[in-house]
Image: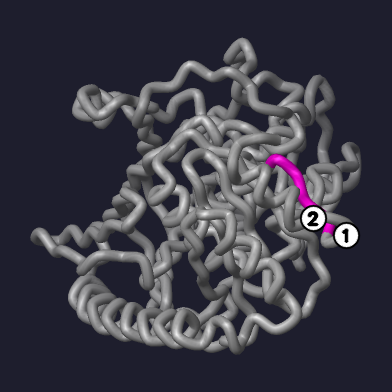
């Protein structure tokens, strides 16, 4: 990669330096030496030919969710007002939930790169591309995009307390409305693949939108929108000459993906007892508990790797039927159990073969930058981790422990 001559500023230190865009970081050398991981960048923006990189606070990274101080979280009756004052991606100031709301754009949480001269815009575009590429990798998008473009986007995501709580930090008492909405809009790189739409703004709000859970896309003039069965809504506009092609292929791929998932799940449910293998005792315990027993796939083309769950009001137990020898995981939640089941399906589809993301401890997760990026950009994975109460090892009278937990007696 080329090294760009610049002036770099970190905290109170400023000096002439060189900036290099690498696969997973910006490497600054010369008068200042620093490695800025993409996993730590919450926002990047150009202001008067100065590139300002806003970094995640150290205590924010321990929460596994970073709440934007300029994003609007509103109850349904205030959504219109929220839309009016919700800012664009160019002003994302990230703060940890439960903090005093201090603006992290203070010098100790930003890195500034300036005096790039004629290379300023080129540097920014190359950095954005590298940042988006790492986000694509972290969201486990292995397929090459069928359409790559840029345009405007918006999204509206329904959230609840578990979205703001990490498994390690405990069940903090957060004052949130019954339905809370995260609203974001701005400019993003957009990719259409055969099973998803990806959006990569120059901040932490990158998303992979699975078509298997989506409704029929809608087009209104030059704006394309689609919704998910969990309530999220996404829109894309200003795609230029790609608008027609994007919409036509989106309809086609969505129809094919929904059908593929439906058939795969019907086969799983029909032959569940034959496929369960060594985890038959878990399925038996789930059924005897009286809870709703559900099953699902990580991917429609991998019928041997799946999961089963027993879901009661406010409590759930999940068993992974995979090559890995994992424990049984238990969860608590304060949303309707049907909503929990939907979000569970989304989380499992999001991780695919990267199932460690569901259960590895917080400390281990923080040591893996790629997984950190994934959790920041995967609301349902973040939700599931936030609901986790622990695990039950398959030893002793573990079946009784599962039944007791689901019954609410543990």
- x%, y% of residue 210? 42, 67
207 vs 30, nearest the viewer: 207
Badge 2 vs badge 1, beta-carbon distance below 8 Å: yes
Quarter location, residue 99: top right
In this picture the colour scheme is one colour
Q: Secondary structure at mark 1?
A: loop
> How far, Cα to Cα, is label 2 from label 1?
6 Å
Q: Main secondary structure of the magenta part?
A: strand
- Determine crowd level at label 1: few under 14, some 14-19, many 20+ residues with C-alpha closer than 10 A: few
> Which dot marks residue 50?
none
Say which residue appears at 54% left-offset and 82% top-offset: 272
396 vs 194, nearest the viewer: 396
> Which dot marks residue 395?
1
Say which residue appears at 90% left-offset and 38% top-offset: 31
Say which residue appears at 83% left-offset and 55% top-offset: 397
Q: Is residue 323 left or right of residue 244?
A: right
Quarter location, residue 209: bottom left
- The residue that disc 2 covers is 398
Tell me if residue 348 comes above or below residue 11 in the rendering.
below
Residue extent of the magenta highlight: 389-393
Please check the rendered image and state whether residue 125 is part of the magenta-colored stretch, yes or no.
Answer: no
- x%, y% of residue 271? 51, 87
Residue 78 seen: yes
Disc tally is: 2
106 vs 66, nearest the viewer: 66
State which quarter of the image contains the N terminus.
bottom right
């Amino acid at each position: 990669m080329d090294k760009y001559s610049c002036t770099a500023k970190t905290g109170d230190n400023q000096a002439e330096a060189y900036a290099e865009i690498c696969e997973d970081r910006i490497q600054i050398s010369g008068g200042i030496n620093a490695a800025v991981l993409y996993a730590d960048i919450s926002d990047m923006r150009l202001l008067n030919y100065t590139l300002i990189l806003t970094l995640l606070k150290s205590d924010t990274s321990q929460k596994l969710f970073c709440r934007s101080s300029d994003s609007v979280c509103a109850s349904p009756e205030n959504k219109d007002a929220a839309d009016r004052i919700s800012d664009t991606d160019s002003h994302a100031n990230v703060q940890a939930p439960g903090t005093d709301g201090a603006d992290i754009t203070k010098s100790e949480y930003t890195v500034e790169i300036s005096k790039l001269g004629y290379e300023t815009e080129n540097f920014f575009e190359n950095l954005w591309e590298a940042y988006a590429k790492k986000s694509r990798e972290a969201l486990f998008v292995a397929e090459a995009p069928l359409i790559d473009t840029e345009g405007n986007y918006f999204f509206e995501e329904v959230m609840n307390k578990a979205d703001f709580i990490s498994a390690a930090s405990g069940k903090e008492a957060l004052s949130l409305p019954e339905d809370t909405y995260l609203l974001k809009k701005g400019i993003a790189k957009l990719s259409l693949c055969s099973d998803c739409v990806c959006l990569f703004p120059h901040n932490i709000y990158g998303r992979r939108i699975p078509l298997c859970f989506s409704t029929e896309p809608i087009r209104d003039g030059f704006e394309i929108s689609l919704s998910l069965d969990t309530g999220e809504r996404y829109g894309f506009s200003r795609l230029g000459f790609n608008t027609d092609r994007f919409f036509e292929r989106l309809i086609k791929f969505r129809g094919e993906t929904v059908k593929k998932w439906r058939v795969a799940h019907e086969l799983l449910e029909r032959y569940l007892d034959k496929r369960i293998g060594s985890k038959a005792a878990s399925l038996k315990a789930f059924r005897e508990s009286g809870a709703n027993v559900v099953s699902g796939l990580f991917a429609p083309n991998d019928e041997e790797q799946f999961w089963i769950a027993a879901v009661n009001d406010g409590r759930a137990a999940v068993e992974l039927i995979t090559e890995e020898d994992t424990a049984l995981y238990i969860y608590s939640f304060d949303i309707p159990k049907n909503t929990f089941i939907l979000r569970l399906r989304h989380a499992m589809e999001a991780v695919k073969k990267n199932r460690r993301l569901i259960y590895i401890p917080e400390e281990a997760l923080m040591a893996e930058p790629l997984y950190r990026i994934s959790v920041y950009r995967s609301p349902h994975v973040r939700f599931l981790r936030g609901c986790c109460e622990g695990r039950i090892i398959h030893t002793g009278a573990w079946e009784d422990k599962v039944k007791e937990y689901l019954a609410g007696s543990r």
